[in-house]
Structure formats: C-alpha cells, structure tokens
Image (cartoon, helix red, strand yellow):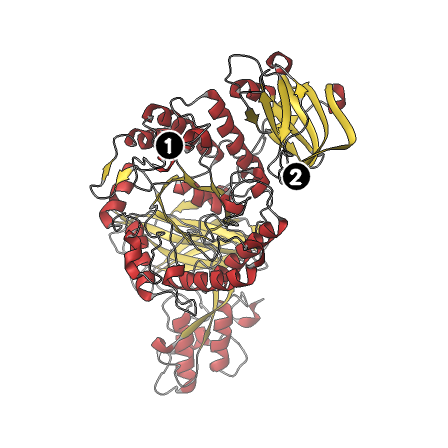
C-alpha cells in the first residue's frame, strides 16, 4: 500500500519521577500540519467513492405512539429489525453507501441525554455497514422539535436540542473513519404552514436553518477525534428542496469538508404524484427535460463552485410501470454520474400502497432479503450505468462557459425600468404577463430574462391555455441578473400535439421581471481546466529502487543512509518498502529539509528480514505551510559496520532518533550509576555541545527536534 501523509508534530512531556517508565509517557500533539494526511480523502474523493446509496427508510427513523418506546420504535412502522444479512444483501447488489435515517427525540431524557440502549443499537447498525467497507450517512430525521409551524421563532429551543444530540453522536463515533458521514438535519421546514413545501418562505425560516446548520458543524468539530476536521458533514437547505428558490438561500459554513444534502424525487409527476397531473406509463422527453433542469441547477449552483452535493433521497414509486422506471433510472444516474453526485435510493419496503401509490418505494423485501420483482430491474439499470466506463464520473462537474448575444440585439418582448413583480405569496400572483411564442420562433434561440429576486421559470401553454409545461433556466448570470432558457430544451419538454402559443414566467418566491428577449442560442466554450486534482495528482509518489549488499538485511548496526535534497523548510515523509514473501511491508520515515537544502534519512536494516526482496525507497509527500515542495533522492549508501558518523540524539545506539532516546537521556541524567551510557552513547546524547556533559537539557533539545521546533542536532549545527 502506498500512501502520503503529513506528520503530527509532537513533543514529549516527561516528569523526572516517571522518566524511566516508558508506559508513563504522555505524548501531546503540539501542532498538526495543514496538508491532509495521505489516507485522508478529499470531499470529492469521498463522494466519488460513495457512488450510490440505499436508505433504510421507515425503520430507525420510525416514531411510536408511546412517548418513550425504547428499542421497539425500530419496528413501530411495520418494518423488521435491520440485520447484518440485510446489509450484506444490499452490498452484494452493488450499493456502496447506506443512509441510516434516525429519529432521536423519543430516546432523550429531560436533559437531552440519549438512551444508552438506543445509541448502542444505532452503533450496531453502523457496524453492520462498516464490516462491509461501506460508507454510512447518519442523520437526525423525523424530529418533532424541528419540523413545526413556529419554526421561525423556535431557534433557541431547537439549537439546544440539536447541539446536545450531535455532541453525543459525534463523541460515540469519534473513532470511526471518513466512511462515516454526518447529516445535520433531514427536511427542516415549517410543518403545517401554507408554505411548508411550496410558496414564499419567510426570511426567518431560512435564517434559522442557516444558524442550525452552523450549530451542527461547530458542535461536531468541537468533539476531539482523529477525524475532527476531516469528517464530511452534510448541510441541508429548507426542506432539502431541489428547488433553486430554496437552496439559493442556503449559507455554506466556512469549512473544508462540507457537502450539500438534497432530496430530488424528480420529476414529481412521474416519480410520486398519485393525484391529478400524475403520469407514469411513459417516461417522456418532457419529464427528462425537467430532470435536466433540476440536476443542472445543482451542477451550476454547487459542484461548479467546488461544493459537493449528495442526493440523500431519490426514487420513483412503483405504479406497475417497471419499464418506464428503468428509463427514468438510466437517465437519472447517467446525469448524476457525469455531475459527480452520489444518490441514495429511498426504500420504505412498500411495493404496493393502495392508499397512496406514490409512497410505494419498495426495492428489497426485508424479511426474505429478495429484491421485489417490480423493482429489481430498476436497481439493475442503475448499476449498469455505474459500471459503464463510457460515462465518466464527474466529467461534467464543471459547467461550460456560455457566450450570449446581448438582449438588446434580439427580439424584445418586454422592457421596463420598473418591471412587473410576481409574488407566490399572493393568490394568483405567482405568474407574469403572457407573451406570444411558438416552437419555430425558438428554433436556434434562447429566451433571456432580466430580473431581480429569485430566478424565474419559463412556462408554456397551448392556444387553449392548456398543457402547462415548465422549463428552468440553463444558466443564471447573477452578476447581470439575467436567466437564460434554451429553446431546444423547450422543444424537448413540449409534449402536446399542437405548438405552444403562450409564454409566461413563474416563481416560487418573489421576482421582478425587467426584460424579456428572444436571442440567438449561446455558443459554448468547454471548461479548459480539469476537476480539482487529487493529492496523488498534485504530488505523485516518487519511487527509487534500492540495492543493498548481501548479508546487510537483518544485521545489527546496519543502516541505509539516504541523502535527500529539496526546498528548505519542507517537511517530508515516505517509506522504505519491501516484499516479505507475497506481502508488501514498509518502514516509514519523516524529515525536515534544513536551510542548506540537504538532509539525511537513516533507516536501520536490522528489522527487515534477510529474505526481503524488491527494496524501494518512496517519497510520499513534501510540503510547507504554503503548499507542496520539491524533494528528491540525491544519493544513498549502506553501512555494514555501523553508522558512519555520530547520529546526534541517538542515545540508545539503534541508528535512529525517537522518544526512546529521550527516555535514555533522562534516565541517565537522573541516575547515571543505575542507567549508564557507553562512551559512544554519551557522544551521541550530548546534543547541546555546551561542555557540561549529558544532562536533562539534552533530553529537552531532542524533544524539540522530534517536534520539529528545531531542525538540527546538535543544537548549534545551523
């Protein structure tokens, strides 16, 4: 295994009374390098590795009529308990991520302390996934204290409970690596209000969600953990909506490991709507155009700005339309794969729902562990797309550059300095005036709309004011306040036999239209830059084959002496690797390049088996606080009669300087008769060169060297 890592600078604190008891040593991190450790994934590496996820819906998130149901809440909505076999079956199908919706409020005492048995059960399910090397999203889900009509004024109460839950969850899972992802909230909203899902949401709702998201991030980051700063955290817009009028109000916390959580049951009339307007027999071009609009909006608003997106919930309910669902699945996963957005399939284990067929999101039977006949082809279609190498993950993460004709040069439909305001909070006020339009007039054209407020959506109707069809803008130029709608997208979305005759604009919030023009279709300039390179691409591992004389390996007082040159001040690390039979093993090293640009790495060979083959010196990483640095192997030699010169600090003569040398020096300084050092060892230990022999100050100097507070031994070598 090859990895790069920055080192943790450490200093050893040793009391004189306990100086000779190695078990009593307390190693305290003094400073952590700013560059990520080699086995630390970037946010986009995490989301790419997640690929596709599956939700354990309506299970750990279920609520009970009992105020304190204990573990029985897991089965309160009719689903069986989660088992290792269930997770194994989901993994075998190709899913690499499990989202565990979890409700906590019925498992809190009056002080917001989580029941131990509930926390243990959640951890048990997380462990089922970790045993399969899967990614896990853990959240807070159906929380009555979040989803409430007085959401706008309840921040103080919500904040206390949210921080209490996340501090306990973060503490319990502090040693779980980056495969565990935390999602702060599920679908935070003003439940029971007229604008719960649609309409003009008051500013206070957005403000509270942004504050709660920041509380979540700050709380998790405050819990001491090896992954304290590198765990991926998902923040959620109002009701996790895929509507730009909602997520445009989301404030992203200032943090390097943040992803946006979106739910996108899109297009709704195909995936869930069991009432008027629902159409399920065919996945039409109009539906696909709607899906294009939603997903490209996520691309433009987030991934194009280097903000990862995770679609935490998506699905198409079973309307006995498997073939159409397969077409939808192929399009959905193809588009999200190109954008580099992992998606988590919602599964409530309901294959038929006579009371509301829009809630039949059953994919696997959780009792038999068999995939439902009506849904398995849908899942298989998703896996086929992910396995298709012709569709590259993240290939369209960045949007192209569009070059537009000026609005004044096109056919002007409307131009006003005061404009017309459309307001979704006013009955009948969410649409603009109407304008004549036809498909022929839009051939090779775009519609440009100048506006203030939220970006409007174009709506088209036939001559009888029927066949309402909406098309969102493919680009919104926020600097000039112009949204652009593609004429080609309109033609794709329009499914009626007759041409559209009327055009208007709609908003989910409040928008003022200042101008409308039909202009030439934009020319496209593809991005010239590649997606953000990985650490490996920025600093590829350097390898150097090493040959040592026969009889060198495994011999006492034999060392490989490596000379490195590079940028002064750079911290560097790597390994000496070798094959031990069929197993690759390695000995790590780290160093700091002195001001003159040359340093030595000394690796004792006594612990490398004499039968080892394929020795290779590797440089994993080199950098300073300002970024990556240059470093290379200049020369090497093997000394079979001991180290060629004094290794200052090496008080125990093992060919390296580490904490055991600090202990040896302190033991000698406290009681020379009981802890003698040889003449050579005394020369090596005298790192202060002050003419007063070896004493405790030499141990302190070695500690400074190990902590990289100083970079030379003896101390006056610089």
Q: Is residue 401 above or below residue 217?
A: above
Q: Mark 1 highlights which residue?
A: 386
The residue at 28%/32% (across/down) is 376
Do we see residue 567 in this rendering? no
Q: Nearer the viewer, residue 405 or 577?
A: 405
Instruction: For mark 1, give the secondary structure.
Output: helix
Q: Nearer the viewer, residue 679 or 72?
A: 72
Question: Could you tell me residue 524's position as x and y percent?
Answer: 61, 24
Q: Earlier in the sequence, mark 1 or mark 2?
A: 1
The residue carrying pointer 1 sits among few (fewer than 14), some (14 to 19) or many (20 or more) residues within 10 Å by Cα, namely: many
Q: Mark 2 highlights which residue?
A: 510
Q: Nearer the viewer, residue 655 or 478?
A: 478
Whether residue 347 sits left or right of residue 166 in the image: it is left
The residue carrying pointer 2 sits among few (fewer than 14), some (14 to 19) or many (20 or more) residues within 10 Å by Cα, namely: many
Instruction: For mark 2, give the secondary structure.
Output: strand
Q: Is residue 673 above or below residue 122?
A: below
Q: Quadrant of the C terminus?
A: bottom right
Discs 1/2, front: 2
């Amino acid at each position: 295994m090859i990895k790069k890592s920055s080192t943790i600078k450490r200093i050893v604190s040793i009391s004189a009374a306990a100086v000779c008891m190695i078990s009593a040593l307390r190693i305290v991190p003094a400073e952590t390098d700013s560059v990520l450790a080699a086995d630390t994934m970037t946010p986009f590496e995490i989301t790419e590795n997640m690929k596709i996820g599956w939700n354990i819906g309506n299970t750990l998130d279920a609520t009970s009529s009992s105020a304190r149901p204990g573990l029985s809440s897991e089965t309160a909505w009719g689903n069986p308990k989660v088992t290792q076999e269930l997770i194994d079956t989901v993994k075998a199908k190709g899913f690499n991520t499990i989202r565990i919706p979890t409700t906590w409020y019925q498992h809190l005492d009056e002080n917001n302390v989580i029941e131990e048995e509930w926390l243990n059960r959640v951890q048990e399910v997380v462990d089922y996934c970790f045993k399969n090397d899967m990614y896990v999203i853990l959240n807070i889900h159906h929380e009555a204290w979040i989803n409430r009509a007085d959401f706008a004024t309840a921040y103080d109460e919500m904040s206390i409970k949210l921080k209490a839950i996340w501090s306990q969850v973060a503490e319990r899972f502090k040693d779980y690596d980056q495969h565990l992802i935390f999602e702060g909230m599920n679908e935070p909203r003003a439940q029971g209000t007229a604008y719960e899902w649609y309409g003009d949401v008051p500013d206070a709702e957005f403000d509270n969600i942004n504050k709660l998201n920041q509380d979540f991030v700050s709380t998790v980051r405050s819990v001491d953990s090896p992954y304290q700063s590198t765990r991926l955290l998902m923040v959620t817009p109002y009701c996790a909506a895929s509507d730009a009028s909602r997520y445009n109000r989301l404030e992203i916390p200032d943090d390097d490991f943040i992803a946006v959580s979106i739910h996108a049951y899109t297009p709704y009339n195909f995936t869930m709507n069991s009432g008027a307007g629902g159409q399920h027999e065919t996945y039409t071009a109009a539906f696909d155009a709607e899906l294009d609009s939603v997903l490209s909006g996520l691309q433009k608003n987030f991934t194009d700005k280097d903000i990862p997106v995770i679609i935490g919930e998506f699905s198409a309910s079973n309307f006995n339309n498997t073939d159409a669902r397969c077409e939808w699945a192929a399009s959905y996963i193809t588009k999200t794969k190109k954008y580099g957005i992992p998606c988590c399939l919602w599964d409530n284990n309901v294959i038929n729902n006579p009371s509301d067929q829009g809630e039949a999101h059953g994919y696997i039977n959780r009792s038999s562990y068999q995939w439902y006949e009506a849904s398995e082809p849908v899942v298989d279609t998703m896996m086929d797309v992910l396995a298709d190498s012709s569709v590259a993950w993240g290939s369209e993460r960045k949007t192209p550059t569009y070059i537009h004709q000026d609005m004044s040069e096109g056919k002007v439909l409307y131009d006003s300095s005061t404009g017309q305001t459309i307001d979704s909070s006013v009955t009948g006020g969410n649409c603009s005036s109407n304008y004549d339009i036809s498909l022929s007039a839009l051939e090779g054209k775009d519609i440009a709309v100048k506006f203030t407020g939220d970006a409007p959506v174009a709506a088209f109707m036939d001559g009888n004011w029927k066949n309402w069809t909406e098309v969102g803008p493919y680009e919104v130029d926020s600097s000039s306040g112009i949204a652009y709608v593609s004429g080609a997208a309109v033609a794709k979305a329009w499914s009626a036999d007759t041409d559209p005759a009327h055009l208007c604009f709609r908003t989910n919030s409040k928008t003022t239209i200042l101008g409308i023009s039909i202009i030439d279709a934009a020319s496209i300039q593809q991005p010239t830059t590649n997606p953000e390179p990985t650490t490996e691409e920025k600093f590829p591992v350097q390898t150097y084959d090493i040959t040592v004389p026969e009889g060198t390996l495994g011999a006492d007082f034999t060392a490989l002496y490596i000379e490195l040159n590079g940028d002064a001040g750079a911290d560097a690390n790597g390994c000496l690797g070798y094959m031990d039979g069929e197993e690759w093993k390695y000995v790590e090293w780290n160093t700091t390049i002195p001001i003159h640009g040359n340093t030595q790495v000394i690796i004792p060979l006594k612990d490398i088996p004499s039968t080892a083959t394929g020795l290779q010196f590797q440089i994993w990483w080199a950098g300073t606080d300002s970024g990556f640095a240059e470093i290379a192997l200049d020369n090497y030699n093997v000394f079979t009669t001991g180290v060629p010169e004094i290794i200052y600090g090496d008080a125990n003569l093992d060919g390296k300087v580490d904490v055991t040398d600090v202990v040896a020096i302190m033991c000698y300084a406290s009681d020379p008769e009981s802890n003698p050092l040889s003449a050579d060892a005394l020369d090596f230990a005298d790192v202060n060169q002050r003419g007063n022999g070896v004493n405790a100050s030499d141990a302190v100097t070695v500690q400074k060297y190990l902590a990289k507070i100083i970079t030379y031994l003896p101390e006056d070598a610089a």
